[in-house]
Image (tube, rainbow, N blue to C red):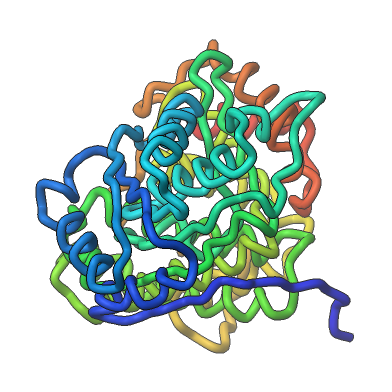
């Protein structure tokens, strides 16, 4: 029997080498002046921001540049960007970079459109609904990791409360997503590894989530196969065009997966770890995926058995213990791309564990509810201890 499901993916997706050059013609349907958001000034210094501004200008779109965004975007930075957009008369937001830049663009589009601080839409008893007042968003990804160009999710950090929730609605999908593998060629190996593992984690979690659909299952399978084929190659040689294209496609497929299947407990934990300890997302996931995998695979063994086979790009496996085989294949990817460290190496201490677990329960509870094992607080703390 086919599982009953609901599926929604409204993003206009433009994929291919050189796709950046078409940004203007697609963006022109949504406004006349854009705020371009990056995390830091690297893309300005490399000339990419100037190139994008010239492309936009050809389509009669003016633009303003905003770079004051951290790798874990802060709610105060979101509000500052929205204020700049308002003062400059912008009517659309372009996130240029990895998930941080795109998430920041989504947050600014919400804050600007509703004329409220972004944190009002994140956590609290009086949390606001993200409505159609949200301004248009264009997503231009330069990494193969977060899938944010294809999702409604935006992750925002409050350093005062040490919380890092994911927010989103049907109104925070990008109007247009530009996926140009040429933009990813300059990613250094460590970032390639970290963002690439995020892609794998998305695909595994959306596939094993109780919110998965038959459509996203197909996309997650393909994403896992592509990661198995190309992540190691992309880390070893960033100029490998086939590997960059493969990982770019895997990332977008996995992003579509989490737009509908969402994520399970490993991502819930990673958000809370990042909020408390400021860790890098992909590295945090790599620390905990083996432990969360082992914990949750008991509840849905038939799905977890497939993952190792797909990572080897095989279609039939006669192994005696397919669950352990899958776990070993995931661990092999982590080892081969240099992410085999524990949470302690990332700055997580035993004193943080209770607050991290409470954070998952408090604002990432959905990841618990749709995890096949539905872990308790004690389970979360045990997973964290085993990941140290």
Q: Is residue 165 above or below residue 248?
A: above
Q: Quadrant of residue 280?
A: top left
- 233 or 259, nearer to the observer: 259
124 lies above or below 90: above
Could you tell me which residue is drawn at 41 percent across and 71 percent down?
28
Q: Which residue is drawn at 62% across and 72% down?
A: 10
58 left or right, relative to 129 = left
Q: Is any part of residue 330 visible from this angle?
A: no
Dividing the image into 4 quarters, which one contains the N terminus? bottom right
Where is residue 346? Give x, y as percent: 37, 28
Q: Is residue 91 above or below residue 385?
A: below
Is 245 placed left or right of 241 in the picture? right
The residue nearer to you, when weighing 388 against 209, is 209
Q: How many labels does the image show?
A: 0
Compared with 26, 353 (above or below) is: above
Q: Which residue is drawn at 60% across and 54% down?
A: 172
Please identify the residue farthest to the top as the structure is shown.
351
Q: Residue at image x 24%, y 49%?
A: 190
Picture coordinates of residue 299, whole percent (x, y): 78, 56
Left or right of 100: which side holds 174? Answer: right
Instruction: Give how far across and how far down residue 183 sits, in percent.
Output: 23, 66
> Can I make out residue 176 in this image?
yes
Q: Where is residue 339 in the image (x, y as percent from the top left)?
A: 33, 46
- Nearest the viewer among 68 and 257 is 68
């Amino acid at each position: 029997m086919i599982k009953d499901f609901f599926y929604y993916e409204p993003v206009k997706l433009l994929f291919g080498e050189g796709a950046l050059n078409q940004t203007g013609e697609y963006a022109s349907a949504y406004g006349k002046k854009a705020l371009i958001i990056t995390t830091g000034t690297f893309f300005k210094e490399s000339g990419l921001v100037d190139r994008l501004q010239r492309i936009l200008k050809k389509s009669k779109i003016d633009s303003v540049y905003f770079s004051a965004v951290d790798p874990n975007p802060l709610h105060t930075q979101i509000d500052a960007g929205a204020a700049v957009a308002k003062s400059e008369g912008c009517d659309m937001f372009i996130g240029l970079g990895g998930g941080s830049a795109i998430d920041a663009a989504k947050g600014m589009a919400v804050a600007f459109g509703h004329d409220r601080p972004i944190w009002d839409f994140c956590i609290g008893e009086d949390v606001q609904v993200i409505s159609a007042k949200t301004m248009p968003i264009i997503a231009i990804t330069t990494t193969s990791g977060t899938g944010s160009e294809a999702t409604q999710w935006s992750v925002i950090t409050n350093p005062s409360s040490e919380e890092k929730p994911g927010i989103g609605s049907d109104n925070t999908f990008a109007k247009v997503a530009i996926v140009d593998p040429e933009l990813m060629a300059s990613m250094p190996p460590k970032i390639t590894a970290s963002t690439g593992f995020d892609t794998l984690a998305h695909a595994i979690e959306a596939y094993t989530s109780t919110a998965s659909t038959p459509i996203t299952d197909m996309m997650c399978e393909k994403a896992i196969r592509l990661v198995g084929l190309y992540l190691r190659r992309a880390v070893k040689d960033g100029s490998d065009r086939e590997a960059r294209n493969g990982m770019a496609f895997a990332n977008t497929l996995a992003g579509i997966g989490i737009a509908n299947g969402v994520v399970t407990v490993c991502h819930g934990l990673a958000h809370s770890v990042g909020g408390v300890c400021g860790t890098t997302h992909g590295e945090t996931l790599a620390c905990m995926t083996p432990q969360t995998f082992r914990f949750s695979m008991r509840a849905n063994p038939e799905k977890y058995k497939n993952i190792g086979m797909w990572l080897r790009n095989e279609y039939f496996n006669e192994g005696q213990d397919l669950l352990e085989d899958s776990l070993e294949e995931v661990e092999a990817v982590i080892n081969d791309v240099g992410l085999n460290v524990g949470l302690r190496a990332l700055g997580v201490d035993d004193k943080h564990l209770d607050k991290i677990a409470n954070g998952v329960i408090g604002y990432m509870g959905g990841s618990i509810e749709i995890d096949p094992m539905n872990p308790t607080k004690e389970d979360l703390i045990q997973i964290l201890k085993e990941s140290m």
